[in-house]
Image (cartoon, rainbow, N blue to C red):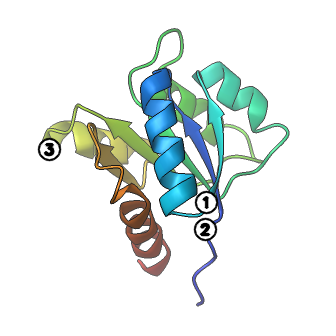
Amino acid sequence: MSLPELKHILLVEDDPDIQMVATLALETIGSFKVDVCSSGIEALETTQDITPDLILLDVMMPNMDGPQTLEALQARPETAQIPVIFMTAKVQTHEVKSYQALGAIEVIAKPFDPMTLADSIREIWKQHHTT
């Protein structure tokens, strides 16, 4: 099975500084197309119009948090198969396991290294499609 190409990432993050750093890292270093949403609700609206290859999802957001957003995405046939990676400062083993139990393919710890973010995502993508 050949590895599908990862080109388009939807970043769902409520912090404008993290949005800027992650977008810059993914577009400039990773050469990805990045769309940014500031909330889970916005992500659900956006994914009605676009279908990213991958969703990077913040865990802690107001109104609709990451796990609630993931659950809503999984409930819709058009977004249920899009791989989701959580980004969070909460990365204790039991927390990571609970995010994976929800359906996230991996968890990236915040703060992340902008210089290695794209490579980390590519590695997770590869692992996800080869296991």
- Residue at image coords 58%, 90%: 1
Which circle's residue, 2 or 3, is located before the other in the chain? Answer: 2
Q: Position of residue 77 (x, y in %)?
A: 75, 47
In the displayed structure image, the side of residue 15 where residue 101 appears, left or right: left
Tell me the SS state at disc 2.
loop
Asked if disc 2 and disc 1 are in contact, CB closer than 8 Å, the reply is yes
In the displayed structure image, the side of residue 51 where residue 54 appears, left or right: left
Residue behind mark 2 = 6
Residue 71 tag number? none
Q: Position of residue 99 (x, y in %)?
A: 34, 40
Which amino acid, by three-letter code, is at mark 3? Thr
Which amino acid, by three-letter code, is at mark 1? Phe
**Mark 2 to mark 1 CA distance (whole Å):** 8 Å
Which circle's residue, 2 or 1, is located before the other in the chain? Answer: 2
Tell me the crowding category of disc 3: few under 14, some 14 to 19, or many 20 or more residues within 10 angstroms, Cα based: few
Residue behind mark 3 = 93
**Mark 3 to mark 1 CA distance (whole Å):** 29 Å
| Discs 2/3, front | 2
| Discs 2/1, front | 1
Which circle's residue, 3 or 1, is located before the other in the chain? Answer: 1
Tell me the SS state at disc 3.
helix
Residue behind mark 1 = 32
Asked if disc 2 and disc 3 are in contact, CB closer than 8 Å, the reply is no
State the image quarter where residue 74 is shown: top right
